Amino acid sequence: MPNELRQNRRGGSLTKREVLDQPAYPISEAARYVRLSPATLRSWFVGRPYPTAKGLSQFAAVLKPARREPVTLSFSNLVEAHVLRSLRTEHGVPLDAVRQSLRYAERELNIEKLLLREELRTAGGELFLDRYGELVNLSASGQLAMRRIFEAHLQRVEWGALRSAIRLYPFVLADRADKKPIVIDPRIAFGRPVVERAFVSTQTILDRIDAGESVAEIALDYGLTAEAIEEAVVFERAA
């Protein structure tokens, strides 16, 4: 992993804010962690073309990537995409409605980058979802379902002292959404997914399994349960 994850342009140590915003994940890798297709994730950060009677036009991006060329996302970008994913329906996420809803809530509350703020769990989230529901004309049942999914996604984000996102617990299995065996923390393992208790990367566990080692052997090495090892493998294979 490049040294830019540890040093800023001046050659000194990165501040906590810089670590969160440092370019670290190519689109293809980030898409695996937040369970989205690379094409969908790219459209959120760089926009996408769409046909009109006069030819192709372009949907503007909703989110701003840490680096545009090549497109590279930061940990903060991962969290934004994770939260935005909760709004997906069978028709995807209407980008213009998301953009308008975010601007509305941020303006009303005087908050920048609302998708990274703990205020999403209170007034910020209420304003954002109310406006979004109006713009996409959601039914009462659709509004209820969206709010439940939105809250489930927020519960997988850990917020720091400044009320900003500092850790992400990605989904592993849909039917066990309450469990958080895997964590992504930009200060640990260069921001790659690790098993929380031992902070060993999920990729390392997968590599050892593929090399022929048993679940029991690996669990003993790291002081983990067999279930934790299996969850790491499931996460890597599902991603």
Image (cartoon, grey):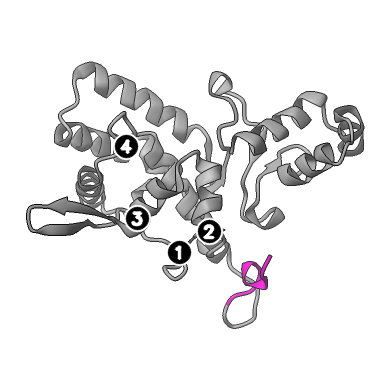
Which residue is rendered at x = 24% and y = 49% of the image? 99
Q: Which residue is mark 3?
A: 63
Q: Which residue is mark 1?
A: 71
Q: Which residue is mark 4?
A: 125
Label 4 – label 3 distance at C-alpha: 17 Å
In the image, is residue 19 above or below residue 84?
Answer: below
Which residue is rendered at x = 78% and y = 46% of the image? 204
- Pointer 2 and pointer 3: residues touching (CB < 8 Å)? no
Q: Which label number is shown at residue 26? A: 2
Image coords of residue 66 (percent x, y): 45, 64
User: Disc 4 marks which amino acid?
Assistant: Gly
Residue 132 visible? The answer is: yes
Give the magenta part as a residue range.
1-8
User: Disc 3 marks which amino acid?
Assistant: Leu
Helix, strand or loop at disc 4?
Answer: helix
Label 2 – label 3 distance at C-alpha: 15 Å
Q: Earlier in the sequence, mark 1 or mark 4?
A: 1
Image coords of residue 75 (percent x, y): 53, 54
